[in-house]
Image (tube, helix red, strand yellow):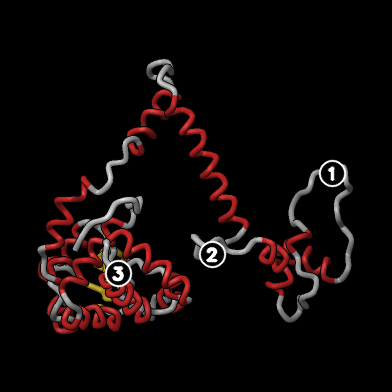
């Protein structure tokens, strides 16, 4: 990292350490630089402004960089290799090609759609909001909370239950366009614009209440030991007894977030909670070519 910064500072001062035309290009691409930017004022813009200007963020992506571009390119290449393997049926039995091709084909041809999830979705569609939360926890889906094992900061030899914020991507709500795109994905999957609006509002409400990343990663800011009785008093609408052992040692990373979830259980219509749970189940596997009705 230090060498990288020194190189860029040298470039900013007019140094000419570019490789000869016959030498392979390695390290930093000078085309990534924005020489119109003052590196002493905005070093980030100077370092990558050229690349950012030439590579706008694709509509389907929340962010874009050389790393994410390379990852997507590698995924497309890998998919092409696997599709080629899956097309052939005359690979030698037991060969790597046959096993890889069969494994890939078993997941994509024919696409199973939502059929495997039908019993679970039916269960969620009939559940009350507190039970919805419990069921997501049983499935290890971190929404909107997660209970994970963690080391006790005060007694490192002891393992405790840590109640933490679930999986929320703030980028989904950062701009009007990003929020609208995310809402459209949910509407397409759940088959209802109104339900999608409610799910997005619920998720945005949770994301807004979560601590910023720096505070969330600060052990002192997330150290709140509690008993089960105290946790029930903090958030009485959550079915804690169905989630936690009565003798469990507990820490609540973000009490304010837990209280917001509790308020949402009390004031958000049950059908929105059910749709939210269905979306969190569907999202990782949904191809968005199938629709369900609520």
User: Whole-percent x and y of residue 196?
Assistant: 30, 69
Instruction: Decide: few, some or many residues near mark 3? Use Cα within 10 Å; few <14, some 14-19, many ≥20.
Output: some
Measure the alpha-carbon separation of dots 2 and 3: 26 Å
* Residue at the image point whose x is 39% and y is 34% from the top: 104
User: Between residues 34 and 253, which one lies in front from this camera angle?
Assistant: 34
Residue behind mark 1? 23
Name the secondary structure under disc 1: loop
**What residue is shown with label 2?**
63
Q: Nearer the viewer, mark 2 or mark 3?
A: 3
Q: Which residue is at 27% across, 55% downward? A: 291
Q: Nearer the viewer, mark 2 or mark 1?
A: 2
In the rendered image, which residue does mark 3 sit on?
A: 193
Q: What is the spatial separation of the Cα atoms under label 1 and label 3, in whole angstroms?
A: 56 Å
Residue 35 higher or lower than 141, as above or below: below
Whether residue 160 is visible: no
Crowd tier of the residue under label 2, counting other residues whose Cα lies within 10 Å: few below 14, some 14–19, many 20 or above = few
Residue 223 drawn at (x, y percent): 32, 78
Q: Quadrant of the N terminus?
A: bottom right
Mark 2 to mark 1 CA distance (whole Å) = 33 Å
Q: Are marks 2 and 3 in contact (CB under 8 Å)?
A: no
Judging depth in this view, the residue of 255 and 202 nearest the camera is: 202
Q: Quadrant of the C terminus?
A: bottom left
Task: Name the element at disc 3.
Answer: helix
Compare marks 2 and 3 and give the one earlier in the sequence: 2
**Viewer-nearest residue: 87 or 258:** 87
């Amino acid at each position: 990292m230090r060498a990288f910064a020194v190189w860029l500072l040298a470039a900013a001062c007019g140094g000419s350490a570019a490789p000869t035309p016959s030498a392979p290009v390695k390290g930093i691409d000078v085309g990534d630089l924005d020489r119109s930017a003052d590196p002493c004022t905005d070093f980030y813009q100077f370092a990558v402004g050229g690349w950012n200007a030439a590579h706008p963020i694709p509509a389907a992506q929340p962010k874009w960089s050389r790393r994410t571009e390379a990852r997507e390119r590698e995924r497309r290449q890998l998919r092409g290799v696997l599709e080629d393997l899956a097309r052939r049926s005359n690979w030698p039995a037991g060969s790597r090609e046959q096993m890889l091709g069969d494994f890939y084909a078993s997941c994509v041809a024919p696409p199973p759609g939502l059929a495997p999830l039908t019993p679970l979705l039916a269960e969620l569609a009939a559940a009350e909001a507190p039970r919805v939360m419990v069921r997501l926890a049983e499935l290890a889906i971190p929404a909107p909370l997660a209970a994970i094992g963690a080391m006790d900061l005060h007694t490192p030899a002891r393992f405790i239950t840590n109640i933490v914020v679930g999986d929320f991507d703030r980028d989904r709500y950062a701009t009007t366009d990003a929020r609208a795109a995310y809402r459209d994905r949910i509407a397409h999957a759940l088959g209802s614009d109104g339900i999608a609006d409610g799910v997005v509002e619920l998720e945005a409400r949770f994301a807004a209440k979560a601590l910023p990343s720096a505070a969330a990663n600060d052990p002192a800011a997330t150290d709140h030991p509690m008993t089960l009785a105290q946790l029930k008093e903090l958030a009485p609408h959550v079915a804690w007894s169905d989630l936690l052992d009565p003798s469990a040692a507990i820490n609540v990373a973000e009490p304010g977030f837990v209280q917001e979830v509790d308020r949402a259980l009390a004031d958000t219509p049950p059908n929105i909670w059910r749709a939210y749970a269905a979306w969190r189940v569907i999202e990782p596997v949904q191809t968005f070519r199938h629709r369900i009705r609520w």
